[in-house]
Amino acid sequence: MTTTAEPTAPGRRAQLKFVLVLGGLTAFGPLSIDMYLPALPRMAQDLHAADTTVQLTLSAFIVGLALGQLVLGPLSDTFGRRRPLLVGLALYVVGSVLCAVSPDAWLLVAARFVQSLGAAAGIVIARATVRDLFSGTAMTKFFSTLMLVSGLAPILAPLIGGQLLNWTSWRGVFVVLTAFGALLLAVVAFFLPEPSVLRTPAGLGQVMRTYGRLALDRSFAGYALASGLLFASMFAYISGSSFALQGVYGLSPQAYSVVFGANGVGIVLAGQLNGRLVGRVPERVLLLSGLLLGVLGGASVLVSVLLRAPLAVLLVSLFLLVSSIGLVMPNASSLALASHARSAGAASALLGVLQFVVGAAATPLVGLGGPGTAVPMAATMAGFAVLALAAFLALTREVTP
């Protein structure tokens, strides 16, 4: 059952259902990464493992998340969205159970890799499904609505994980993730219909040609790089802000949590503002505005650190940069996927993988200056924000709104 026509947007009640289901799938990544972070020290003690070994559970998850998207995205273009998604969710549940019962750290690392493959299915297929269901400004509006979920998940996940540890062990965190995966598996199995997708061949050669075609598409590359590079600036903030704000500026852990949460709220608010403006303001203009806001925020962060400005100035600058994600991601995703209905799964995979690959490259730069300085974090954030704007201007300049 295929069609080449642009999709007709679902009604309001159906849209609410898709927001809840696709939002839950989008939240897989941040929930699975952030919820267990408060438990890492306990895990190392219980498993009699070195801290570096336990930290490999995070690395294994991120690697699996990237590889899983590259594989499952094109598969969903061939076999439809439901079957790869159901298989992925089943893998997530199995991986989560294995995490909860792992007797040693190395088995836990392997279990996290299995879990990450399932999480990848949720993330990449959710984004492709949005392209199946919507087009034009309706697609951008829906991506903006999803920012409500994807913005809140990183805020709530560490808080939930910390509270769980008050009455259960770290294994209980993975039991909760198992229940979350099982719930979404049941919801997808019974309530998420198969979108009408024009399917493409599944051979390795065809998949590689599809990825090559996407990479050579100037506008797709521009939008993907713009979002990926700005996301790298966000990665630098996530990996360096705890050290910088607590170690250099003296914030308590509680005060840092408030700042981190406030910046997450900024993403949500910017995403909702974007949803209200799209349709009145072209997506390309909104994307450019978000990139300019990111550059302004990044430059302000760097200047604040170099001039040792008051902490309030730095916090406002961080808020501006982090909030810009709420404007950039919905518009960049929508514009990048707009011309690739037949290969939405592969296009979604490249978008997602680029964010993690570039983000991973940004993370080690934050610590180059050693302890006692926030300059490397600030310079990394500002630099990647500028690169994001440059990629947008250089590669998408011929595209008209």
Image (spheres, helix red, strand yellow):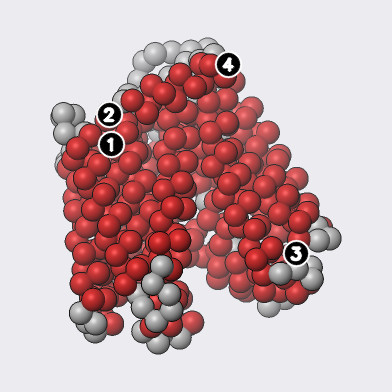
Q: CA distance from mark 1 to mark 4?
A: 27 Å
Could you tell whether 138 is left or right of 209 in the image? left
- Image quarter for residue 310? bottom left
Dot 2 crowding, Cα within 10 Å, few <14, some 14–19, many 20+: some
N-terminal of the two: label 4 or label 3?
A: 3
Q: CA distance from mark 4 to mark 3?
A: 40 Å
Vertical position of residue 306 compared to residue 156: above or below: below
Q: Amino acid at mark 3?
A: Arg
SS category of the residue bearing label 3 = helix
SS category of the residue bearing label 4 = loop
SS category of the residue bearing label 1 = helix
- Image quarter for residue 186? top right
N-terminal of the two: label 1 or label 3?
A: 3
Mark 3–mark 2 contact, CB under 8 Å?
Answer: no
In the picture, the disc for residue 79 is none
Could you tell whether 273 is left or right of 337 in the image? left
* Residue ID for mark 2: 218
N-terminal of the two: label 3 or label 2?
A: 3
Dot 1 crowding, Cα within 10 Å, few <14, some 14–19, many 20+: many
Residue 39 pos. (x, y %)? 66, 70
In the picture, the disc for residue 203 is 4
Residue 365 pos. (x, y %)? 40, 62
Q: Amino acid at mark 2?
A: Arg
Residue 244 pos. (x, y %)? 39, 76
Q: CA distance from mark 1 to mark 3?
A: 42 Å
Mark 1–mark 2 contact, CB under 8 Å?
Answer: yes
* Residue ID for mark 1: 222
Dot 3 crowding, Cα within 10 Å, few <14, some 14–19, many 20+: many
Residue 46 pos. (x, y %)? 78, 72
